[in-house]
Amino acid sequence: MIEGILLTLLRAIPQVNSAIGEHIYPVVIPENIKHPSMRYYLTDKPNDLTGSGPEERQTCHVQLDVFHHRYQQARAIFKSIQHSLHGYRGAVNTFQIDLIQCMDADSTFDQTTRDYRINFALNLKYKEISHD
């Protein structure tokens, strides 16, 4: 559900779409995929308890990693995501996104794969819109 919204928002960012394209994967990037690529995983899966109450708001925490063989390009992809999504509010399909916060960027270099990785988190506050 919310993963599909996340993918829609990420792929709508021109730099992500042109540099990474369809190479956005949940949890593990397949071994045969060459970088640049991105992976994501939900560190807090939304559940019915978080969406209770009169507002029916839910919160989802997502960890993302951008992989690229050049640091400047990896950083540019992260910056484009940060610029496009931090503070985002709007309707996407059947969800009302109240706020996206982009947090905690960190960069590393993997000696084995020779790739740079930018790791960061997104916090999404949202609710499902009913279409009665």
Image (cartoon, grey):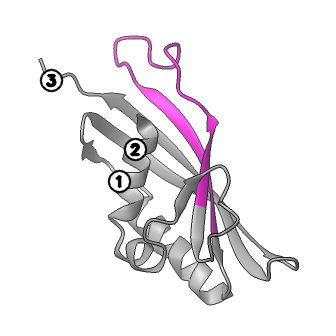
The image quadrant that residue 99 belongs to is top left
**Is residue 46 within the magenta segment?**
yes
Pointer 2 or 3: first along the chain: 2
Front disc: 2 or 3:
2
Hey, what amino acid is under mark 2? Gly
- Examine the image and state in which quarter residue 119 appears: bottom right
Residue at 15 percent of width and 23 percent of height:
131
Task: Mark 1 or mark 3: name the one nearer the start of the chain.
Answer: 1
Q: Residue at x 43, y 49 (%)?
A: 6
The answer to whether residue 123 is magenta is no
**Residues at marks 1 and 2 touching, judged by CB atoms closer than 8 Å:** yes
Q: Residue at x 44, y 12 (%)?
A: 52
- Give the x, y percent position of residue 58: 45, 27
| Amino acid under disc 1 | Thr
Structural distance between the alpha carbons of marks 1 and 2: 6 Å
Say which residue label 2 marks: 4
| In-image side of 92 versus 99 (left or right) | left
Q: Going by the image, does 72 lie left or right of 12?
A: right
**Residue wearing tag 1:** 8
Q: Say what secondary structure mark 3 lies in.
A: loop
Q: Quickly name the residue at label 3.
A: 131
Q: Is residue 118 above or below residue 60?
A: below
Q: Where, quadrant-wise, is the N terminus in this rendering? A: top left
Identified by mark 3, the residue type is: His
Q: Position of residue 13 (x, y in %)?
A: 36, 69
- Secondary structure at numbered mark 1: helix
Q: Quadrant of the C terminus?
A: top left
